[in-house]
Image: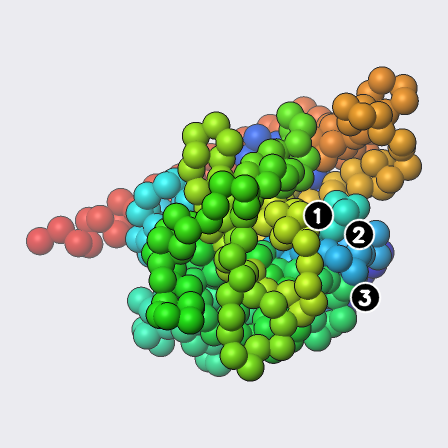
Amino acid sequence: MGRIAHRFGRVEPRPRARQLVLGLLSDLPRKNCWTIAEHTGDASPDGLQHLLGRAKWDADLVRDDLRAFVLEQLADDQAVLVVDETGDLKKGRHTVGVQRQYTGTAGRIENAQVAVYLTYASRHGHAGIDRSLYLPRSWSDDPERCRRAAVPEEIGFATKPQLAQQMIERALDSEVPAAWAAGDEVYGDNPHLRAVLEKRQLGYVLAVSSTHRIPTPACPQRASHLVKLIPRRAWQKLSAGHGAKGHRWYDWAQIAISTPDLAGHEHLLIRRNRRTGDLAYYRCYSPRPVPLSTLAKVAGSRWTVEETFQSSKTLAGLDEHQVRRWDSWHRWVTLALLAHAFLAVTAALERRDQTPADDGTSTDGLVPLTCNEIQRLFTALIAQPTRDLAHRLRWSIWRRRHQARARHSHYRRQAGLQP
């Protein structure tokens, strides 16, 4: 918290920011301004709501401090910049960016808010370092709706690959050490994003769909067609990295892609599940020749962003915000990523200080501390809640009074709409 204190021009927001991060690191079942304020001893959520909505501070500058903190401990010149989007289910239509759209969180079309995130994955560990809220055309084409949600006038429509490109270029411009980028089909099927990465000489292993067309000397061919031309002896059993239950073994093969005037090497990478035979396809680029094992390892690193989503939502309340405006969303999400980065970096330092056995345990017979266990210890030893009886009763009265006002307002609005 001392690292970001200078980002707040006044003294008052600094303890509020610390209070919010402590609440995000707590074991509260739901994390929002109400529950965190009660947990940390405030008489009402007004102070935290002011921090997120009206206080003067720049969430992008705090994001820069977050990135510097992660790199200070996890930097690796062979690191992978992993991009992916995730959705938060929301009700109503006034929360910035919300509309009915597909989200992998629900696995179907739902009323949701979608954002693209950038995760830094190295051999030391991984953590989120950037975020961009996806603003659908139903928002960007409605100036009045954007004005009510305080969306800056210069913000227009941008696709998810464009948001990913902006975050990757922002990281590279800040001299983030990385050799690769990875992402799913949304990003791999986008030729403009691939061209930008090639221009920046950043290698990539991006998933593509089975219908993705690969250039060949004859004519472009679907990836699913080219895989039929691979001889049996070309497949190699390689690990995509360590998982919770050991190595993740797959069969891998690659086909060279000849692209005129490209300064580098392109391949179609194919992964085959050894049990089911299911296939996955990747478009790959590297400035220099690399072995198949390296491409397989980079492809396997994409799971780190899913783990980041799961742990940052479960442990740091990334998706539990109850804010409607543009700045408020960026402030909550940035501080949630900062809280999660604290856990991820602490876990990485724990692993670095131990010599693991072949099965992943340490010499004392224990697995290294995980983010979950670090949060439990932190909550028990540091983030002690306020348990005063009078404080609990005051909050009960405050909640009931606020809910009574809300109910009264709803009934008045309903009555006014009656014919």
- Residue 11 at x, y percent in the picture: 79, 62
- Identify the element where label 1 is drawn: strand
Amino acid carrying label 3: it is His
Q: Is residue 309 visible?
A: no
- Identify the element where label 2 is drawn: helix
Where is 205 relative to 146, above or below? above
Mark 1 lies on residue: 126
The residues tagged by marks 2 and 1 sit, at their Cα atoms, a distance apart of 7 Å
Q: Are the two marked residues, 2 and 1, in contact with CB atoms closer than 8 angstroms?
A: yes
Q: Residue at x 67, y 47 (%)?
A: 293
- Judge from the rendering whether residue 104 lies leftward or rightward of residue 17; answer left or right: left
Image mark for residue 6: 3
Mark 2 lies on residue: 74
In terms of depth relative to the viewer, which is nearer, 157 or 304? 304
Query: Reading the chain from its start, which is encountered first: label 3 or label 2?
Result: 3
Q: Residue at x 83, y 36 (%)?
A: 351
Where is 185 relative to 264, above or below? above
Query: Reading the chain from its start, which is encountered first: label 2 or label 1?
Result: 2
- Residue 230 at x, y percent in the picture: 46, 49
Q: Residue at x 77, y 23 (%)?
A: 359
